[in-house]
Image: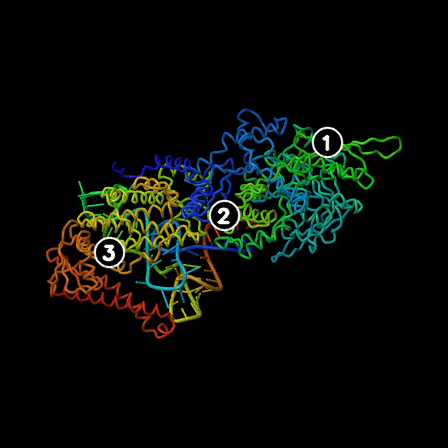
RNA sequence: GGGUGAUUAGCUCAGUGGUAGAGCGCUUCGUUCACAUCGAAGAUGUCGGGAGUUCGAAUCUCUCAUCACCCA
């Protein structure tokens, strides 16, 4: 059956992928023929994810390395999987539920909500897997991993043990002292009501204002405020003020102010340091403190300090005793200030039952504020409304000094898009300072290499300045923190802190056992230990663990503890905590599996630079902390895919190219080849569809070369020869293309070894199109059509071999079209995906054949160029004359006459003593050739052609001679460079002489 | 403000000290049996500006300009 004219990607891709999967071609170790292993972990996409250009790029590069190693016989594993994406998944599921009018708060039990999430995951969580398959990704899907597999409540089919790994790591790290719970300011997302990481916060510029508020000075204090200035800006007149003006972009936080800061050297305020102001509305007396953070040139130079609601204020507060812990406050004789949280978890102003807030306030003020802002659950004001109310009131009461419009950055949650609130809460942290050392060391000493190298700097910079990592999230979808709280006892067995004792264990029963031991030791009795499962009941507040201590007392005796009820921390772990274990977790750790032994440490990680901190650094730290080994020896960091104008692709800009649509239109191979050809290290790639179309055409070109071969019996030779080296061929053309194939094999391997994907793609493009299709197929025609039986046989065999090599070498980049052609151009033992990667090299290259064919190609191009410029009709056969040919040229001509004549449309070659008038000169090494075109030749056109050529040669000669005439060049340049330059100058001189002679002859004519 | 990178043909980009390249686009020609998703030929560059090192610089150094990204 004759081949179609083009490759039908839409039909073939699904069929071929199914065939690969069915045959188990991607399974770990498939096609292994040597002991070395090669393992890549996929950067797990979100379970909510769908394929975007970045995934397409990232996974194309991984697939190339994986297919290349598998064909070379490595024991190969490409481990796929997804992460459970805490916030993103909760968002998607809540959105689904919202369609039915249900919210998360309608669920009575956490388990019910989590069950819904699992339901969603099983229905819709596989989207990206199918999309990766369309791209051709050769992952071992039978091992597909999920960071929540095996978690409590996981349904059938999700029984993996990733959960065990996560919990075990937490417990290990907790016991090693790497994990602790503490009260710190975190980025709080009021929509999702959870802490989020710095990296999930984006800064958005918004139009806002600076509100100036007057805080009255207490105890009759005043200061001189400048009101008139001379030309130099020196104050010339002052007014006496009995208040300080603070400027703020967030007036609603004033309810939580614990001080006002001024610069210690500010002459206006120096005498006020240590005095107090009275906070309007609540009447709290707060100190004026000295801190460099206050910039005298900014605003009024006095800045309100709200430690519980601003990161900078927190630092100022800690330095100045106005953000003390409870213990510090007691020890300091209750003279300092504690930070005051005035918001609930939904960023509404929380005043009712807020003891920290009310503590030093005027009771009437408090009552008024509660009535206005926080009367009851329905009336509690969101932060924006409270701001409006406060400004209005300030205006009415005369303590609003003014309003200045101000454009400033406001942090927003990248998922929720709402303004982030710095929020003071208890959270769990990894004490990264304790585990960062080995991760830095591994890259410094080269055990792990980051490519391109510039990214090592980013890695070092981030790790050297690492902050504690907040790993708790107030979500339901995730790994619940394996810590149970119970009352802490003193040496007399008395409760000192209801929440003070933590029991960290992999299971509830182990925690209970730990607790029983603790209480027995403290009390000398057996204390009954139970577990209380808390539920989310407090609207607008975070659910905290609530352990219970039960005791009995008889008469005057101390109460005796007889039972406690533990309460588990309700928080879950940051998704990145589980993704951080990806390399070991996917291989079955903590079980000692054969895969873990075989494939860990893995080889290469391919990822985008945007998650170097998020993920790469954390994997390094965690693997080293947990199993004390690096997770991979090479990290290849690729750039971003942008649109053709260089803009980051984003849904809001509408410039997103959907890889699946591109695959539909151009085929997966074309998309893959484009991404590969543009993957120069460290550069963003700007993608345009015309480029993809170009590479689709490349596939068609290859297809048609095979089609030509098929039509000429290349694949159906009844007595085929076998080509093993260039000595199996006699014809120069065949010997030449065998050598060219060997060259490209070396180039491709070298490129891939160095992660120079674009070099591999471009070398193959130039070879397949520029060498095989443009020249070899054309050269083969005279042999296949008119050659001797032996020549035909040899050429068919060579062509079959060359095309096979093209398919093999292209397969990692273009798996579909190559596999399809492989199947239709021969009877094969194995599919191409498992074909043996060649190892031939220099021994296949015949320098003589190389020289000869390059001469032939030059000659044909010269003749074609002369003809085209002289306006010789394309179809016309022309005679050619030679006045001189050296032996090499003579041999080359004799051996390749048929194909030169065919491709250059030369009718004959005759040797003459002198050229007749009206000839067009063909400049070629080792021969004087000319086309007698007396009837046709346009003297002026030929003259300008020759002059142009001469001008170019003269310019080149000038440069070359300039160097050769410089004694310093002869002395200091390497011998071979000097030699090369001499040869080149010689050749140019010969060519110029020929052109001059030709010009002289033209002169005779004209 | 700090850091990183970029500036090469009309466009998008390769190019680690030795004759400036590719793809796309453009112009002219072409229905010969692999391919018009094609073929042949052609035009197009003070390699961002300036200075330096060197026999020799797109490439190394310094400086200026412009742009981009990351972090504050």
SS category of the residue bearing label 3: helix
Disc 3: which residue: A732
Q: Position of residue A738 (x, y in %)?
A: 29, 53
Going by the image, does A958 lie left or right of A621?
Answer: left
Is residue A655 visible in this depiction of the protein? no
Going by the image, does A613 lie left or right of A975?
Answer: right
Residue at horizontal 66 percent and vertical 55 percent from the top: A236
Disc 2: which residue: A605
- Mark 1 neighbour class, 10 Å CA radius: few under 14, some 14 to 19, many 20 or more: some
Is residue A979 visible in this depiction of the protein? yes
Going by the image, does A483 lie left or right of A128?
Answer: right
Q: Residues at badges 1 and 3 in contact (C-beta under 8 Å)? A: no
Going by the image, does A367 lie left or right of A24?
Answer: right
Q: Position of residue A396 (x, y in %)?
A: 67, 36
Q: Nearer the viewer, mark 2 or mark 3?
A: 3
SS category of the residue bearing label 2: strand
């Amino acid at each position: 059956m004759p081949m179609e004219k083009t490759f039908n990607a839409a039909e073939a891709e699904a069929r071929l992928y199914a065939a690969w999967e069915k045959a188990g071609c991607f399974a770990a170790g498939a096609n292994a023929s040597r002991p070395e292993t090669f393992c890549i972990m996929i950067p797990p996409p979100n379970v909510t994810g769908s394929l975007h250009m970045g995934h397409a790029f990232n996974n194309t590069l991984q697939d190339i390395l994986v297919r290349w190693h598998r064909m070379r016989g490595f024991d190969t594993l490409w481990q796929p999987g997804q992460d459970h994406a805490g916030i993103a998944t909760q968002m998607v599921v809540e959105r689904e539920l919202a369609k039915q009018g249900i919210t998360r708060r309608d669920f009575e039990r956490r388990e019910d909500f989590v069950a819904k999430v699992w339901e969603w995951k099983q229905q819709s969580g596989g989207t990206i897997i199918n999309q990766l398959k369309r791209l051709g990704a050769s992952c071992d899907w039978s091992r597909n991993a999920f960071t929540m597999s095996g978690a409590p409540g996981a349904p059938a089919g999700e029984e993996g043990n990733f959960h065990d790994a996560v919990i075990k790591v937490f417990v290990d790290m907790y016991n090693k002292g790497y994990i602790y719970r503490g009260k710190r300011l975190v980025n709080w997302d009021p929509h999702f009501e959870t802490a989020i990481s710095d990296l999930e916060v984006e800064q958005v510029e918004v139009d806002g204002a600076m509100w100036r508020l007057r805080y009255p000075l207490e105890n009759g204090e005043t200061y001189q405020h400048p009101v008139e200035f001379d030309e130099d800006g020196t104050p010339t007149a002052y007014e006496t003020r009995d208040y300080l003006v603070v400027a703020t972009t967030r007036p609603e936080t004033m309810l939580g102010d614990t001080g006002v800061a001024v610069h210690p050297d500010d002459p206006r305020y120096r005498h006020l340091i240590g005095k107090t102001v009275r906070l309007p509305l609540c009447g709290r007396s707060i100190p004026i403190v000295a801190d460099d953070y206050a910039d005298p040139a900014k605003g009024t130079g006095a800045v309100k300090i709200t430690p519980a609601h601003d990161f900078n204020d927190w630092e100022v507060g800690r330095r100045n005793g106005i953000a003390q812990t409870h213990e510090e406050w007691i020890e300091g004789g209750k003279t300092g200030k504690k930070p005051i949280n005035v918001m609930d978890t939904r960023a509404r102003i929380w005043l009712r039952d807020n003891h920290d807030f009310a503590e030093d306030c005027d009771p009437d003020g408090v009552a008024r504020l509660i009535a206005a802002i926080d009367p009851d659950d329905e009336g509690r004001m969101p932060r924006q409304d409270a701001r409006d109310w406060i400004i209005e009131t300030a205006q009415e009461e005369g303590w609003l000094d003014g309003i200045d419009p101000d454009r400033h950055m406001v942090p927003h949650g990248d998922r929720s898009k709402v303004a982030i609130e710095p929020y003071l809460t208890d959270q769990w942290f990894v004490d990264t300072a304790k585990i960062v050392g080995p991760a830095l060391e591994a890259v410094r000493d080269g055990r792990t290499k980051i490519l391109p190298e510039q990214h090592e700097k980013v890695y070092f910079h981030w790790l050297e300045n690492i902050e504690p990592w907040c790993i708790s999230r107030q979500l339901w979808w995730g790994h619940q923190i394996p810590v149970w709280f119970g009352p802490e006892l003193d040496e007399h067995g008395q409760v000192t802190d209801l929440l003070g004792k933590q029991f960290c264990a992999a299971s509830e029963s182990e925690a209970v056992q730990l607790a029983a031991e603790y209480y027995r030791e403290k009390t000398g009795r057996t204390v009954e230990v139970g577990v209380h499962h808390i539920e989310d009941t407090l609207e607008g507040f975070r659910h905290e663990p609530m352990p219970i201590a039960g005791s009995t007392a008889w008469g005057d005796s101390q109460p005796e503890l007889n039972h406690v009820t533990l309460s588990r921390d309700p928080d879950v772990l940051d998704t990145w905590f589980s993704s951080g274990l990806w390399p070991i977790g996917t291989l079955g750790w903590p079980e000692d599996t054969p895969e873990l032994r075989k494939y860990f440490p893995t080889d290469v990680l391919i990822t985008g630079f945007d998650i170097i901190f998020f993920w790469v650094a954390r994997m390094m730290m965690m693997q080293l902390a947990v199993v004390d080994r690096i997770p991979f020896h090479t990290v290849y960091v690729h750039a971003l895919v942008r649109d053709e104008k260089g803009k980051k692709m984003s849904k809001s800009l509408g410039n997103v190219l959907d890889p699946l649509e591109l695959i539909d239109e151009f085929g997966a191979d074309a998309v893959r080849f484009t991404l590969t050809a543009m993957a120069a290290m460290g550069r963003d790639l700007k993608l345009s569809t015309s480029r993809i179309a170009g590479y689709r055409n490349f596939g068609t070109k290859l297809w048609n070369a095979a089609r030509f071969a098929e039509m000429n019996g290349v694949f159906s030779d009844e007595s085929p020869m076998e080509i093993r080296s260039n000595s199996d061929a006699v014809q120069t053309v065949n010997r030449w293309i065998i050598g060219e194939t060997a060259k490209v094999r070396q180039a491709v391997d070298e490129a891939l070894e160095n992660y120079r994907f674009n070099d591999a793609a471009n070398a193959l493009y130039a070879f397949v199109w520029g060498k095989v299709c443009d020249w070899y197929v054309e050269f083969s025609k005279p042999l296949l059509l008119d050659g001797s039986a032996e020549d035909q046989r040899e050429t068919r065999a060579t062509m079959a071999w060359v095309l096979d090599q093209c398919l093999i070498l292209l397969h990692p980049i273009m798996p579909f079209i190559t596999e399809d052609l492989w199947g239709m151009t021969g009877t094969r033992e194995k599919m191409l995906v498992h074909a043996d990667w060649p190892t031939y090299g220099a021994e296949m290259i015949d320098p003589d054949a190389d020289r000869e064919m390059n001469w032939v190609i030059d000659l044909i191009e010269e003749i074609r160029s002369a003809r085209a410029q002289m306006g010789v009709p394309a179809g016309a056969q022309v005679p050619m004359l030679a006045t001189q040919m050296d032996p090499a040229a003579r041999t080359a001509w004799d051996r390749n006459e048929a194909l030169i004549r065919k491709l250059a449309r030369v009718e004959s070659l005759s040797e003459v003593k002198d050229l007749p008038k009206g000839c067009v000169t063909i400049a070629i090494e080792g021969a004087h050739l000319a086309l007698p075109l007396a009837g046709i030749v346009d003297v002026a056109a030929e003259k300008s052609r020759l002059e142009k050529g001469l001008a170019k040669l003269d310019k080149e000669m000038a440069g070359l001679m300039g160097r050769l005439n410089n004694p310093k060049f002869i002395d200091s340049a390497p011998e071979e460079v000097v030699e090369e330059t001499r040869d080149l100058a010689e050749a140019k001189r010969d060519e110029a002489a020929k052109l001059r002679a030709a010009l002289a002859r033209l002169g005779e004519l004209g």
